């Protein structure tokens, strides 16, 4: 890239360039930024909590002060031709990958689909430590077994728009976090509270492969 006077302003690759032949309003910029953030796994600046908007202004993620890290999601927005079927954060050290149906090599080769426009599944975390474990506020069913279950110090929040249906989650990334014992039995705790998991729904992992 270059500036008006010809001096070099940017050297590097751009995933996508969006051009409009008019000055965009703040809301229009927010819609475009949201589209790009979802598509490329980039978190919008949340110094001031910022919503993610679909092309028609529907709020698909509500900005907040706690769950503001590595905002990631999948979804369909016909007006902007967004059809994001799998994603993971490209910002920093998050360890969750989400997909509609089976995770494919690329989004383009993912053969699943959303059934209707404006269906989204978005999530973010509270920046809790992924290498810290605790057994506080755990379901009794996990405390009464001999497998010594503990939960990660990091908590994720999910926001769903429309009837997005079932999704798959993959936990772990090489170099960041893996289950380093083949006999580990990871479980997902789904709770309406971000601090109390005593009544959480327990979901077993389908499989563990190469620590993920």
Image (cartoon, rainbow, N blue to C red):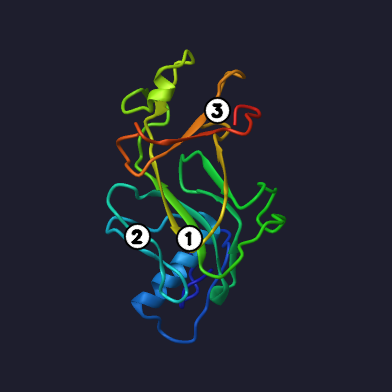
Residue 16: name its quadrant: bottom right
Disc 2 crowd, CA 10 A, few/some/many (<14, 14-19, 20+): some
How much space separates mark 2 and mark 1, taking CA atoms?
14 Å
In front of the other: 170 or 161: 161
Mark 2 and mark 3 residues within 8 Å of each other at the beta carbon: no
Counting residues from the start of the chain, the first of labels 1 and 3 encountered is: 1
Which residue is found at the position 44% from the left and 86% from the top?
22
The residue wearing badge 3 is: 178
Q: Residue furthest bottom?
A: 22
Give the camera-side residue of 35 and 77: 77
Residue located 46% across and 39% down the image: 93
Tell me if residue 154 comes above or below residue 51 in the rendering. Answer: above
Question: For this rendering, which residue is in front, 69 or 141?
Answer: 141
**Mark toward the start of the polypeptide (2 vs 3):** 2
Q: Is disc 3 placed on a helix, strand or loop?
A: loop
Q: Is residue 150 visible?
A: no
Query: Which residue is at a point 40% across and 84% down the rendered structure image?
Result: 23
Label 1 sits on a secondary structure element that is: helix
Q: How far from the left and from the top, in percent, is residue 68?
A: 35, 50
Q: Could one spot residue 34 in this view of the protein? A: yes
Work out how far the residue at label 1 is from the one at label 3, CA to CA, in angstroms.
26 Å
Q: Which is more toward the observer, 184 or 17?
A: 184
The C terminus - image quarter? top right
List the residue tagged with mark 2: 62
- 85 relative position to 36: left or right: right
Comparing labels 2 and 3, the label whose residue is closer to the camera: 2
Q: Estimate the x, y position of residue 57 in percent, counting from the top left.
A: 41, 74
Residue at mark 1: 37
Residue drawn where x is 45% and y is 77% of the image = 56
């Amino acid at each position: 890239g270059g500036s008006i006077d010809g001096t070099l302003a940017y050297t590097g690759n751009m995933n996508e360039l969006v051009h409009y032949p008019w000055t965009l309003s703040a809301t229009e910029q927010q819609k475009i930024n949201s589209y790009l953030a979802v598509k490329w796994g980039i978190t919008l600046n949340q110094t001031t909590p910022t919503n993610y908007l679909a092309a028609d202004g529907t709020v698909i993620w509500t900005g907040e002060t706690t769950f503001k890290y590595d905002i990631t999601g999948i979804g369909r927005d016909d007006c902007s031709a967004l059809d994001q079927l799998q994603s993971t954060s490209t910002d920093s050290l998050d360890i969750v990958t989400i997909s509609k149906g089976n995770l494919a090599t690329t989004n383009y080769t993912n053969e699943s689909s959303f059934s209707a426009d404006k269906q989204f599944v978005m999530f973010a975390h509270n920046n809790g430590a992924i290498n810290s474990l605790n057994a506080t506020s755990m379901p009794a069913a996990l405390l009464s077994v001999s497998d010594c279950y503990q939960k990660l110090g990091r908590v994720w929040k999910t926001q769903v728009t429309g009837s997005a249906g079932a999704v798959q989650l993959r936990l772990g990334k090489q170099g960041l976090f893996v289950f380093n014992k083949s006999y580990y039995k990871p479980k997902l705790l789904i709770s309406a509270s971000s601090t109390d998991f005593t009544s959480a729904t327990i979901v077993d992992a389908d499989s563990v492969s190469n620590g993920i």
